Image (cartoon, rainbow, N blue to C red):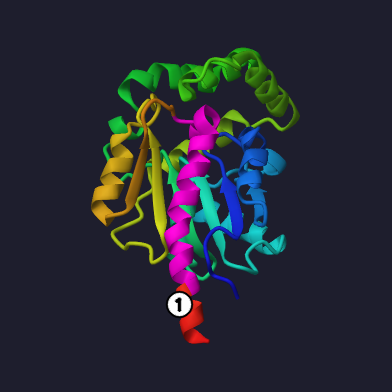
Amino acid sequence: MNKAPGKNWILLRGLARESGHWGDFVPLFQSAFPDAQITLLDLPGTGCFHRETSPCTIKAITDSVRRDALNKGVIQQPATILALSLGAMVAWEWMRRYPEDICGAALMNTSFADVSPFYQRLRRQSYSDFVALAIMRDVHNRESGILRLTSNRRNQDEQIIQAWEKIQNKRPISLKNSFRQIIAAASYRPGDIKPKQPVLLLNGLGDRLVSPTCSEEIHKKWDLELRRHLWAGHDLTLDDGAWVVLQLKEWLTPINRGHGQLLRGLT
């Protein structure tokens, strides 16, 4: 069984988002890893599971996502996870509880309750905007507000808003599920055990939703590699997907070189 990272990818989005929100990043990612299997999975309560009730804990969300992966045969070969925000919490929990499933993970703009205070995990200046968007009924205005809060790129706003509005109209995430996901994210405390798998942290220094210091604290606590984007916001793959791909390829090259040397040494 090939346990080298980067051959079998699982992509997980964040709070109140679904696989459709990866947008143009998916073909860009596939072109960078042409021989890799890439699977987009939805969290419970979003995407193809939007009619389901989201659990209130990261542990239960992880179990749900893992069942979906097992049903689809996605983890017959160990997977590398690329995950954003709440999705990265799921990836961490997955690595921690089912290490045989995962051979590496790249975690973007994430945070843990036992590492960073709540006012950094959701930045003070975003409180009012976040609550207003959560209860806003007008889909176009809500998606427009989410884009302004999570992205620092303005050159394709209307095109992206229309795509997101279409997603929400087709597979709406309920206010109830949004708040249940918030509860799960806010309460997630993974403990002190460092994952055995390679982990890369990516963050955007222009993130106005989650403070970049949250990734810094995770980096310091577990001595994990952290790469910083100078201006990107919370939705890192939307703001600069090419930069994300470049970091992933640079991260994987020495890991896979070492994996290949190990295999040759065993034969």
Secondary structure under the numbered disc 1 in the rendered image? helix
Residue 57 position in % (x across, y down):
47, 49
Q: Is residue 37 above or below residue 204?
A: below
Magenta-tinted stretch: 234-260
Which is nearer the eye, 35 or 208? Answer: 35
Residue behind mark 1: 262
Name the amino acid type tagged 1.
Leu
- The residue most toward the bottom is 267
- Tell me the residue at 48%/33% (across/down): 236
- The residue most toward the left is 220
Label 1, residues with CA under 10 Å away: few <14, some 14-19, many ≥20: few
Residue 15 seen in the current view: no
Q: Main secondary structure of the magenta part?
A: helix
Which is nearer the eye, 119 or 34? Answer: 34
- Tell me the residue at 49%/67% (across/down): 98
Which is nearer the eye, 131 or 93? Answer: 93
Residue 38 position in % (x across, y down):
65, 52
Left or right: residue 140 versus residue 200 is right
Q: How many marks?
A: 1
Q: Is residue 232 above or below residue 154?
A: below
Q: Quadrant of residue 18?
A: top right
Q: Quadrant of residue 232?
A: top left
Residue 67 position in % (x across, y down):
63, 60
Q: Is residue 243 magenta?
A: yes
Which is nearer the eye, 238 or 135? Answer: 238
- Tell me the residue at 28%/59% (across/down): 192
Q: Is residue 156 magenta?
A: no
Q: Quadrant of residue 158?
A: top right
Which quadrant would the N terminus be assigned to in this image?
A: bottom right
- Tell me the residue at 72%/60% (across/down): 72
